[in-house]
Image (cartoon, grey):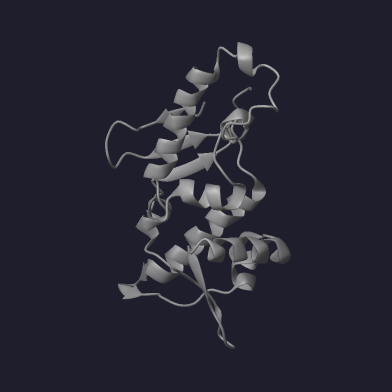
């Protein structure tokens, strides 16, 4: 379960340590791309708006992301109405909604599918994939953990990732030198 520090006040900095819960590289790239687009399109430089279309190559180069994989990720985000494609020689992508209206949970669900910490939470009434369903004593407690995680991710937006310093920082504990 993520360790969240600083969640006591509304504007406190939230640091999420991902230990066992892990998002895919595609989801990571989606969040990086959306944060970059939001900063370019809704940020300010010297008091002036910096709004402009952002192309795939620019994002890939800025964040060292494989271009082909990023293109697929951006297509998925467009299918889920988070970004819009702009055609033409200066084409690329723009956010389809305000950064505050795109939650981290929406991005993860668009890229990875339904959010869940156990396979049995992804399946409606078919629990055939779990041999322990009849005898499972952790399903209800895990459901509470999952609901808390989904609530937390739903309460965080791309806008939160734009602040300086960012309100949301996702780090690995290994990076801090903490033994796992």
Residue sitting at 49 percent across and 77 percent down?
53
Number of numbered discs present? 0
**Residue 144 placement, left or right of 179:** left
- Residue 105 screen position, x and y as percent: 47, 46
Give the residue at x 61% y 37%: 22
Q: Quarter of the image holding residue 138?
A: top right
Q: In this view, does 150 lie above or below 99?
A: above
In this picture, residue 93 sits left or right of residue 42: right
Q: In this view, does 3 lie above or below 39?
A: above
Residue 170 image offset from top left, x and y in percent: 51, 41
Q: In this view, does 36 lie above or below 174?
A: below
The reply to whether residue 31 is in sight is: yes
Q: Is residue 178 above or below residue 136?
A: below
Point 38% across, 68% down: residue: 42
- In percent of width and height, residue 48 lies at 32, 76
On the image, the x and y values in percent for residue 83 come to 49, 67
Q: In the drawing, does residue 165 fall left or right of residue 33? A: left
Q: Nearer the viewer, residue 68 or 169?
A: 68
Q: Residue at x 59, y 88 (%)?
A: 89
Horizontally, residue 24 falls left or right of residue 35, namely: right
63 or 41: nearer the viewer: 41
- Determine the residue located farthest toward the bottom in the rendered image: 89
Q: Which of 25 and 47 is in front in this view?
A: 25
* Residue 176 in view in this figure: no
Q: In which quarter of the image is the C terminus?
A: top right
């Amino acid at each position: 379960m993520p360790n969240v520090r600083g969640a006591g006040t509304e504007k406190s900095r939230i640091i999420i340590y991902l230990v066992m819960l892990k998002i895919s590289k595609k989801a990571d790239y989606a969040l990086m791309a959306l944060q970059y687009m939001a900063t370019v399109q809704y940020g300010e430089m010297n008091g002036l708006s910096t709004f402009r279309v952002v192309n795939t190559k620019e994002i890939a180069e800025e964040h060292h992301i494989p271009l082909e994989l990023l293109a697929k990720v951006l297509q998925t985000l467009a299918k889920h109405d988070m970004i819009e494609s702009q055609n033409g020689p200066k084409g690329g992508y723009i956010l389809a909604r305000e950064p505050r209206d795109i939650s981290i949970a929406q991005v993860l669900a668009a890229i990875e599918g339904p959010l869940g910490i156990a396979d049995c939470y992804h399946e409606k009434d078919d629990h055939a994939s779990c041999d322990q369903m009849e005898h499972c004593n952790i399903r209800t407690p895990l459901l509470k953990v999952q609901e808390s995680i989904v609530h937390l991710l739903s309460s965080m937006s791309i806008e939160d990732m734009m602040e300086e310093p960012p309100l949301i920082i996702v780090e690995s504990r290994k990076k801090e030198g903490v033994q796992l």
